[in-house]
């Protein structure tokens, strides 16, 4: 009888252990914590500490890897996470080119990917590959709409454009050009620069020679400061606008006094204390900012928000997926994709999300604000 009792006990323990394994959701995270894109990847990797460890009855395991800013490594790590770890979803990679490089792999694996990147090209135009991808930053058209509105209000009729020579800059050219034309704003010069450039003198001289009322820079963090600094040093007196890629402390740190007065459309999480309590996303933005500060002793760059918001999306989608399949199965991954697409009116740190079959970013204007820089700090522009 004693032996039988032991057997029963062991069987119960075995079943419990089996259930525990089945109840674990595995999420891969690829962040460029080293290399040229580390200014993006480090806050993203740091933000993993704020993600939910348990959703309902399910334990969440995050498998975090550094691709060293190398798109080839992004693909290699993605394949490893899919084949060896059997992940249920991927958060990452950090850079737009890296994310574009793994789209095919994720689509073939039929596994959801939450991409914390700037370019809308990861989700637009929608096709069979991109239907597995969800972008965790606002699409360029949401930010561009705010920029065009600010320009129209300030009487801008002509503008020069300079953007990164990568998917981020290319998509911004496409998005902004169409909106500017519709608003009656003429682009008089259109230039490119590379992230690693140490000088953009030639491009700046062409921009100034075109005599635009204003200039828009589509760059990311520190590299966006280079064209701005050289425009100011070359005597340009018009207003200089920036995309949300410049909405970071690194942009101010590198730009210094030369970037004072820049106009940037970006997320309200940069200035949550300046936002009205009636704004639906203020509470979530403050939770992210204070949580990050508590762990790391500094305010989070906006790049970390893409990871944090991915966690909120999963928190809402995982319970729905679990009704249709067990973690680790294709049924669960497909249901997770479907659940993410059905998210409605969800407040995250960067805005309010309403996903559709054609819009896998889902952000609207409610997390978007016009900012400027004064005395080395972000200031909300109320107009």
Image (tube, rainbow, N blue to C red):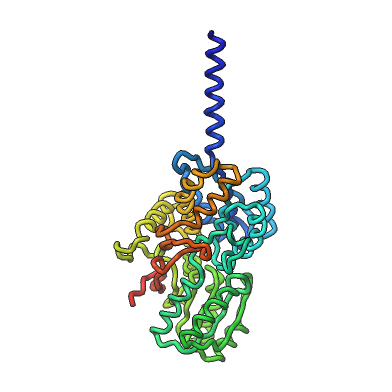
| Quadrant placement of the C terminus | bottom left
Of residue 222 and residue 63, the one placed in the foreground of this image is: 63
Q: Is residue 131 visible?
A: yes
Taking the view exactly as shown, the residue that stands out farthest to the top is: 1
Image coords of residue 368 (percent x, y)? 41, 69
Image coords of residue 178 (percent x, y)? 53, 81
Query: Which residue is located at x 57 percent, y 50 percent?
Result: 334
Query: Which residue is located at x 34 percent, y 61 percent?
Result: 280
Place residue 381 in its image quadrant: bottom left
Q: Is residue 377 visible?
A: no
Of residue 13 and residue 304, the one placed in the foreground of this image is: 13
Q: Look at the picture and state if 125 lies above or below 34.
A: below
Of residue 364 and residue 262, the one placed in the foreground of this image is: 364
Q: Look at the picture and state if 75 lies above or below 62.
A: below
Image coords of residue 41 (percent x, y)? 56, 57
Image coords of residue 354 (percent x, y)? 44, 62
Query: Which residue is located at x 41 percent, y 62 percent?
Result: 352
Taking the view exactly as shown, the residue that stands out farthest to the left is: 277
Drawn side of residue 158 relative to residue 272, left or right:
right
Of residue 317 and residue 268, the one placed in the foreground of this image is: 317
Q: Look at the picture and state if 225 lies above or below 151.
A: above
Drawn side of residue 3 relative to residue 353, left or right:
right
């Amino acid at each position: 009888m004693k032996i039988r009792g032991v057997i029963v006990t062991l069987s119960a323990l075995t079943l419990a252990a089996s259930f525990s394994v089945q109840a674990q959701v595995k999420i891969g995270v690829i962040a460029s914590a080293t290399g040229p894109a580390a200014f993006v990847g480090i806050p993203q990797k740091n933000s993993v500490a704020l993600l939910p460890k348990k959703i309902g009855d399910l334990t969440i395991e995050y498998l975090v890897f550094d691709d060293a800013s190398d798109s080839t490594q992004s693909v290699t790590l993605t394949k490893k996470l899919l084949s060896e770890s059997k992940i249920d979803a991927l958060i990452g990679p950090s850079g737009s080119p890296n994310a574009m490089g793994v789209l095919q792999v994720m689509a073939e694996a039929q596994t959801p990917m939450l991409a914390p990147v700037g370019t809308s090209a990861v989700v637009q135009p929608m096709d069979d590959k991109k239907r597995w991808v969800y972008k965790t930053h606002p699409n360029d058209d949401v930010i561009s709409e705010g920029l065009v509105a600010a320009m129209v209000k300030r009487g801008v009729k002509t503008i020069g454009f300079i953007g990164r020579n990568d998917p981020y800059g290319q998509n911004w050219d496409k998005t902004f050009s169409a909106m500017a034309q519709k608003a009656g704003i003429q682009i008089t010069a259109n230039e490119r620069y590379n992230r690693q450039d140490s000088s953009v003198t030639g491009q700046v001289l062409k921009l100034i020679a075109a005599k635009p009322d204003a200039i828009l820079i589509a760059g990311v963090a520190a590299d966006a400061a280079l064209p701005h600094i050289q425009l100011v040093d070359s005597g340009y007196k018009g207003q200089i606008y920036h995309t949300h890629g410049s909405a970071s402390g690194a942009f101010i740190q590198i730009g210094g006094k030369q970037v004072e007065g820049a106009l940037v459309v970006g997320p309200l999480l940069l200035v949550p204390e300046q936002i009205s309590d009636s704004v639906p996303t203020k509470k979530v933005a403050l939770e992210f900012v204070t949580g990050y500060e508590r762990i790391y002793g500094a305010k989070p760059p906006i790049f970390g928000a893409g990871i944090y918001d991915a966690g909120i999306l999963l928190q809402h989608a995982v319970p729905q997926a679990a009704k249709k399949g067990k973690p680790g199965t294709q049924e669960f991954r497909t249901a997770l994709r479907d659940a993410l697409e059905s998210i409605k009116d969800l407040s995250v740190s960067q805005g309010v999300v309403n996903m559709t079959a054609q819009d896998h970013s889902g952000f609207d204007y409610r997390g978007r604000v016009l900012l400027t820089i004064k005395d080395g700090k972000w200031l909300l522009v109320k107009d």
